[in-house]
Image (tube, rainbow, N blue to C red):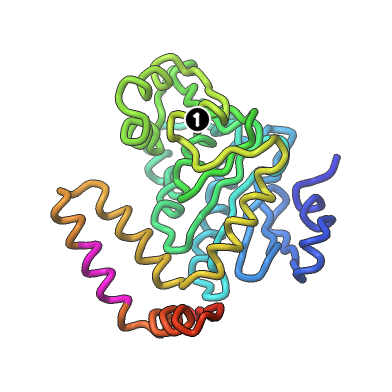
Amino acid sequence: MCTPINMFVQSKRFQEEGGHVAVSGNEVQTARPLPHVAMVVIARPLRRNALNLEIKSRIADLVEELDRDPSVRAIIITGGSEVFAAGTDVDEMVSMSPTDHTLRASDRMFTTIRQCQTAVIAAVEGFALGGGCELAMSCDLIVAGAGSRFGQPEIRVGVMPGAGATQRMVRVLGKYRALRLLLLGDTITGEEALAMGLVSEVVPDGDAVQRAQELASAIAELPPLAIRAILEVVDAGADVPLETALLLERKAFQLLFDSEDQVEGMRAFLEKRPPDFLGR
C-alpha cells in the first residue's frame, strides 16, 4: 500500500517544486510539498488514524513549530488518501479519569490549531469522526472528498464531544441540525457537509490533498500579515457584539497600512505587475 508520504513524494509537482519530507515519528510525518507550504500527515492506517494522546501531542508540537517558522505561510493537515481520522483512540480513553484529561491536556491539539496564526487547511478523505471531525473543524478551511464521512458518534460510546463540536456545530449548522448529529451520532457525507456549511469545498474522492495544496499555494503567495489579521479578526469577532467586531476589523485594517506588503501590493496593482509579498 502506498503510504501518504510516498504518495506525495511520487507526485510530479512535488519533485518539480523541490519538495522534501521530514519523518517526525512513525505515526505523524511532515512534508514540504510546495514553497512556503507545510503538511502534517497522520499515518496510522491500521487504526484508521485514531488519535491517541501521543499523536495529538505530536501534532500540536508540529503546528506550534511551523507557526513560528516565517518560511511557512500555510499548513495542511491530512490523513492521506483513505481516512482522515476515525476518532479518538477508544482503547486509550476507556480507562482515563477526569484528572487524566486535565493533567495530560487532552485538548491541547485542538486549541493549538485554533490559535495558530498561520492558515491551516484540513484535507479530508474517508472518515472524519469524533475527534477527527473536531480536528477538521479546528482548521480554517476544510477540503473534503465527496464520499468522506463527518460525524460525532461519541453518544454511542456513552460520552459526548469534548473538543468543540457542541459549540462549533451549533454556530455553523444551527441548533436543530447540530443536535440531530450530536444526539443520534449520525454521519453525513462530504456533499451533505458542504450543503450544510460544514466544509469549504468538496472535490472528487482522492483529490482532497491535491486541492488543499492548490489552496495553500495560493494563500502562500498572498501577504502573510494580512492573512494573519483576517484570521485573528474572524476568530475574535465571532463571539462579541457586531459593533465591537466591526471596530476590531477597522483597527486591524488600519494597522496593515504600516506594512511593507501594503505598499508593495498597491504599487504592484497600479503598475500592473505581480506583487512580491515578504511578510513585512
Front residue (pair 92, 208): 208
- Residue 108 position within the rendered picture, expressed as x and y whole percent measured from the top left: 43, 49
Residue at 53% across, 63% down: 219
Main secondary structure type of the part rendered in magenta: helix
Is residue 226 located in the magenta-colored stretch of the structure? no
Front residue (pair 129, 243): 243
Disc 1 crowd rating (10 Å Cα; few below 14, some 14-19, many 20+) is many
Residue at 22% across, 66% down: 250
- Residue 125 position within the rendered picture, expressed as x and y whole percent measured from the top left: 65, 37
* Screen quadrant of the C terminus: bottom left
- Residue 204 position within the rendered picture, expressed as x and y whole percent measured from the top left: 68, 36
Quadrant assignment, res 71: bottom right
Q: Is residue 234 visible?
A: yes
Dot 1 corresponds to which residue? Answer: 193
Residue at 63% across, 31% down: 146
Quadrant assignment, res 124: top right
- Residue 158 position within the rendered picture, expressed as x and y whole percent measured from the top left: 44, 17
Q: Is residue 104 visible?
A: no
Residue at 59% across, 54% down: 76
- Horizontal side of residue 239 vs 166, given as left or right: left
- Vertical order, 166 against 266 (above or below): above
- Magenta residues span 248-256
Front residue (pair 116, 140): 140
- Horizontal side of residue 30 vs 51, given as left or right: right
User: What amino acid type should be assigned to the residue bearing mark 1?
Assistant: Ala
- Vertical order, 268 against 108 (above or below): below
- Horizontal side of residue 251 vs 93, given as left or right: left
Front residue (pair 216, 100): 216
